[in-house]
Image (tube, rainbow, N blue to C red):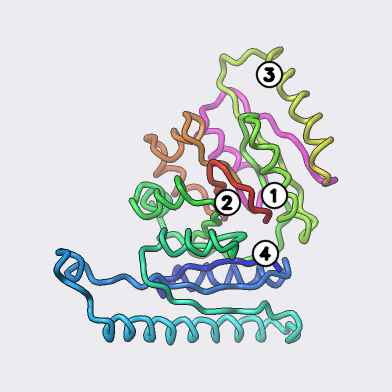
Amino acid sequence: MKTILIPTDFSPNADHAALYAMELGKNMKASLKLCNAVMVPASASMSGQVAWPLMDLGTLRADANRQLKQVSEKLKKHIKDTGASREEYPPVEVLAEVGTVPEVLNMLAEKGEVNLVVMGTSGVGGLNRFFLGSTSRDLINNGSFPILLIPPGTDFKPLKRIAFATDFSDGDMELIHSLSHFARPFNAEILIVHITPDDFDPEIHQKKVDSFLNEVTCKVHYHKVYYRHVKDMGIDEGLTWLTDHVDIDMLAMVHRRHPFIKRLFEGSHTQKMAVHVKLPLLVFPPETHTVL
């Protein structure tokens, strides 16, 4: 069974993301793992001579597990209130581990216990803070798992169309194949989107498109894959236009260390994207072999 990992700090935005993940789990027949990273207070690690008392650390973990169980009960009540039968309840496990969020999530990923991480963002400017913060930047740069970001106020609805932004990189084919497993339970369309500036060469571009889409047909065995060309725009401008003018339920993209994604996550228009994009944002790491 697939596993959706939900890291939480017990904030309202984290609770909201957990509800979204619960609905995903119900539809995808996936189990849920609620996780809290128990952080040792900074004062305890200021010196190699200082050790945080084991009894106090155990108290922190026990308190975290208690709060995790409370969140779990809220999730189960939510599913029950929707009229779902008990057989439809996704299994929910709670886990409190000592370490930073990246350390805990990567440890679980190494054990093969993560197919997807679902996290909440912090509102207007939230994506900017998420991606530029040291903790989350480490998750994106070094994690081996996809992360689904849920903006505040984004209620779950069955997915009808997922847009995947591509620059025709070789690795995108495997990710589209993985994305098809995500879309299949909803019978959702996958809209492959390529954005080009106004100085692109139409002939060269068309050859790339034809080659890429032929490969999609041969390698991605999913019947609802379509293509959309957004031209005469920059990357961030094109993605904003896409989310404003095309009916999509989720935006998916790859975080790679080259200008295509770097401009979005580090460029001057990042805050504008954070304001405009009110959709769930699925971010694939530079390399992943995880099947959603």
Instruction: Kindly state the secondary structure of the residue where label 1 is placed.
Output: helix
Callout 2–callout 1 Cβ contact below 8 Å? yes
Q: Position of residue 203 (x, y in %)?
A: 71, 12
Q: Is residue 209 above or below residue 129?
A: above
Q: Nearer the viewer, mark 3 or mark 1?
A: 1
Callout 3–callout 2 Cβ contact below 8 Å? no
For marks 2 and 4 on the same chain, the one whose residue lies earlier in the sequence: 4
Q: Nearer the viewer, mark 2 or mark 4?
A: 2
Instruction: Tell me the tag on residue 179.
Output: 1
Instruction: Tell me the tag on residue 205.
Output: 3
The quadrant of the image that shows the N terminus is bottom right
From mark 2 to mark 1, how far is it between C-alphas?
Answer: 10 Å
Judge the density around disc 1: few (<14), some (14-19), many (≥20) Cα neighbours within 10 Å: many
Q: Position of residue 91 (x, y in %)?
A: 65, 79
Q: Residue type at mark 1?
A: Leu
Identify the image quadrant of residue 59. bottom left
Q: Residue type at mark 3?
A: His
Instruction: Tell me the tag on residue 282.
Output: 2
Instruction: Kindly state the secondary structure of the residue where label 3 is placed.
Output: helix
Q: Looking at the image, which is closer to me, 44 or 82?
A: 44
Q: Residue type at mark 2?
A: Leu
Judge the density around disc 2: few (<14), some (14-19), many (≥20) Cα neighbours within 10 Å: many
Q: Nearer the viewer, mark 3 or mark 4?
A: 3
Q: Nearer the viewer, mark 1 or mark 4?
A: 1
For marks 3 and 2 on the same chain, the one whose residue lies earlier in the sequence: 3
Where does label 4 land, which residue? 157
For marks 3 and 1 on the same chain, the one whose residue lies earlier in the sequence: 1
Magenta range is 222-251
From mark 2 to mark 4, how far is it between C-alphas?
Answer: 15 Å
Instruction: Kindly state the secondary structure of the residue where label 2 is placed.
Output: strand
Callout 1–callout 4 Cβ contact below 8 Å? no
